[in-house]
Image: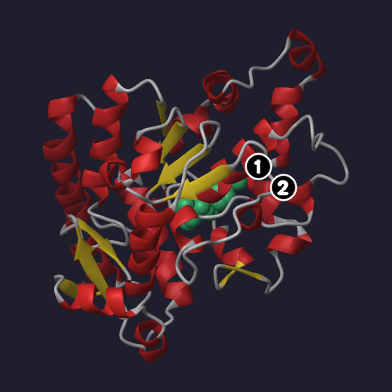
Amino acid sequence: YLQEEEALSQECKELICSLPKEKGWIFSHIYKYEGFWYSARHLQGVIACQKYFLAQESDIFLVTTPKSGTTWLKAIMFTLVNRKRYPVKENHPLLNNNPHNLVPFLELEYMDNQQPDLSLSSSPRLFATHFPYFLMPNSVHDSACKIVYLCRNPKDNLVSLWHFAKKLKLQATAIHSLEEAFDMFCSGLSPCGPFWDHVLDYWNESKKNNRILFLKYEDMKEEPAVHLRRLAEFLGYPFSADEEETGMVGEILKLCSFDNLSNLDINKTDKKAYGMENKSFFRRGEVGDWKNHLSTEMTRKIDKITEQKFSEVGLVL
Ligand code: A3P
């Protein structure tokens, strides 16, 4: 924890002194900035990125809350937009790189550097981020960049987050029981949360802004080919008749599938992305694992929150 705070800029140190502070999941504390909760280092990246990032018209953003399937969509989107440059075959970059090393988290690039090198192996540039829409850097709002939002059922999201935090547990003081994690999540105290506010921000924006494609993890799992085609059209990389005939859709899905990625050597070793072991990004990759973890009472409580937050806008998760 000391290291975490020592590495902060003076500006960020001063800022966090003025912000609401709560116990964190992975790091000791999280801070509430403009309605959302971040670790101190993440917040430093958020602030610098808002200030210095300059979007290019062709940039593509993948937005998620942590543990809603970012790794999977990073792999899919990277493969999709770069398929001419990197055909889906033996030496594809995903076979030797964790998806997080191919598609960076935008704000994390700014954590220690106001001018990070953003020349990427993807063309167009492809970034992931956990920014709520309204906090995105101005240059993103002012450009024609495309934004893909991926969300996941809150119960599965919570269970996935809990396992991830438990595995990492970088700080002795971080959360230690599922009950505690549950209460914090339901109170909105999750990394980049409140979960429901994050999802609502993009859901509402996607209704009036055709630059945003709103996707659900569960839909992707149920009908991956349908949603991959939708994604390809949206990003301006539709599948040609030739590609359809030769089974490109299936090939991309197979390359990026949980079974394939999680069994690659690169994702089984102790190698790290963002200080976290590559293997920590792969657990079960299923829909409905919450049934193995949440009690009836917990289920009732979290479902009620979801109903209260989403029913008015017609969103079902
Ligand atoms: P579980 O913990 O439920 O297994 P993120 O990538 O946003 O950190 O989310 C991680 C979740 O996505 C984990 O969920 C992980 O197992 C799952 N995941 C990772 N790769 C996947 C893939 N290729 N297909 C489906 N789910 C995947």
- The reply to whether discs 1 and 2 touch (Cβ–Cβ < 8 Å) is yes
Q: Residue at x 70, y 65 (%)?
A: 268
The percent coordinates of residue 203 (x first, y second) are 28, 31
The percent coordinates of residue 267 (x first, y second) are 69, 61
The percent coordinates of residue 296 (x first, y second) are 21, 52
Which residue is the site of mark 1?
257
Helix, strand or loop under label 2: helix
Q: Image quarter for residue 239?
A: top right
Residue 260 circle label: 2
Taking 305 as reference, is 275 left or right? right
Q: Image quarter for residue 142?
A: top left
Alpha carbon of mark 1 to alpha carbon of mark 2: how far? Answer: 5 Å
Q: Nearer the viewer, residue 40 or 258?
A: 40
Residue flagged by tag 2: what amino acid is it?
A: Asn
The yes-or-no answer for disc 1 within 8 Å of ligand 1 is yes
Any part of residue 295 in sight = yes
Residue flagged by tag 1: what amino acid is it?
A: Ser
Taking 309 as reference, is 256 left or right? right
Pointer 1: residues within 10 angstroms few (<14), some, or many (20+)? some
The yes-or-no answer for disc 2 within 8 Å of ligand 1 is yes
- Screen quadrant of the N terminus: bottom left
Taking 254 as reference, is 57 left or right? left
Residue 74, placed above or below residue 110: above
Residue furthest to the bottom: 2
